[in-house]
C-alpha cells in the first residue's frame, strides 16, 4: 500500500478551481485567529446575568488604564484565552461574579452562551470551556475602574 492521503483528510487547494465537482465556496481555506474567537467568547460571557467582569483584578486594572488611552478601546477579550485548531477550539475564561448569584448556574449559562456564539459564528466545534471564578463583586464594594473626574 502506498502512503497517499485518503479522501477524508485531503485539503482542497485552489489549483482545482476548474474542477466542476468542487463548489466555489469550497475552493480555498478559511482560518480564524485566536483573537477572533476570544472576542466572540468575551462578548457572549459578558451577556450572562451574574457576570460582573472578566479577567483577574490586575488585568482589569491594566485594562481600565488602556480603555482611557485614545484609540485603546475596550478589551472585549480580557479574561479569555482561546486555542484554535483547524476545526475545533478550546477556551479558558476568568470571570468575576456578582455577590448572591449561584456560581454553578452562572458558569453553566456562560458555557452555553459562549459555545452557542462561537460555534454559530465560526463553525468551529467548541470542545471545552473552562471557567475560573477569580472574584466576587460585593454590593458595597467600590468599582476598581472609577470614572475619571472632570476638573
Image (tube, grey):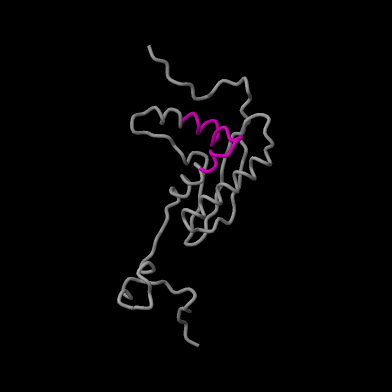
Q: Residue at x 48, y 21 (%)?
A: 146
Span of residues in magenta: 44-62
Q: Residue at x 59, y 49 (%)?
A: 129
Residue 114 vs 18, above or below: the answer is above
Position of residue 50 measured from the top left corner of the image (x, y, whole percent): 61, 34
104 displayed left or right of 66? right
Residue 114 vs 11, above or below: the answer is above
73 displayed left or right of 119? left
Q: Residue at x 47, y 86 (%)?
A: 2
Q: Observer-nearest residue: 7 or 18?
A: 18
Position of residue 145 measured from the top left corner of the image (x, y, whole percent): 49, 25
Q: Residue at x 44, y 47 (%)?
A: 35
Q: Observer-nearest residue: 113 or 134?
A: 113
91 displayed left or right of 74? right
2 displayed left or right of 137? left
Position of residue 69 measured from the top left corner of the image (x, y, whole percent): 36, 28
On whether residue 48 falls in the magenta region, the answer is yes
Quadrant location of the C terminus in the rendered image:
top left
Q: Farthest bottom residue?
A: 1
Q: Farthest top residue?
A: 151
Residue 71 vs 118, above or below: the answer is above
Position of residue 102 measured from the top left corner of the image (x, y, whole percent): 69, 36
The mark total stands at: 0
On whether residue 116 falls in the magenta region, the answer is no
Amino acid at each position: 500500500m502506498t502512503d497517499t492521503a485518503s479522501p477524508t483528510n485531503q485539503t482542497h487547494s485552489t489549483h482545482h478551481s476548474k474542477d466542476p465537482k468542487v463548489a466555489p465556496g469550497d475552493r480555498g481555506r478559511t482560518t480564524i485567529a485566536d483573537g477572533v474567537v476570544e472576542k466572540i467568547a468575551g462578548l457572549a460571557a459578558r451577556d450572562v446575568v451574574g457576570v460582573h467582569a472578566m479577567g483577574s483584578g490586575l488585568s482589569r486594572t491594566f485594562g481600565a488604564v488602556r480603555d482611557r488611552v485614545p484609540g485603546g478601546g475596550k478589551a472585549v477579550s480580557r479574561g479569555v484565552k482561546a486555542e484554535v485548531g483547524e476545526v475545533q477550539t478550546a477556551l479558558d475564561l476568568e470571570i468575576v461574579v456578582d455577590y448572591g448569584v449561584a456560581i454553578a448556574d452562572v458558569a453553566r449559562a456562560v458555557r452555553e452562551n459562549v459555545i452557542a456564539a462561537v460555534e454559530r459564528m465560526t463553525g468551529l466545534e467548541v470542545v471545552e470551556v473552562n471557567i475560573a471564578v477569580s472574584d466576587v463583586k460585593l454590593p458595597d464594594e467600590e468599582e476598581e475602574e472609577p470614572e475619571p473626574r472632570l476638573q
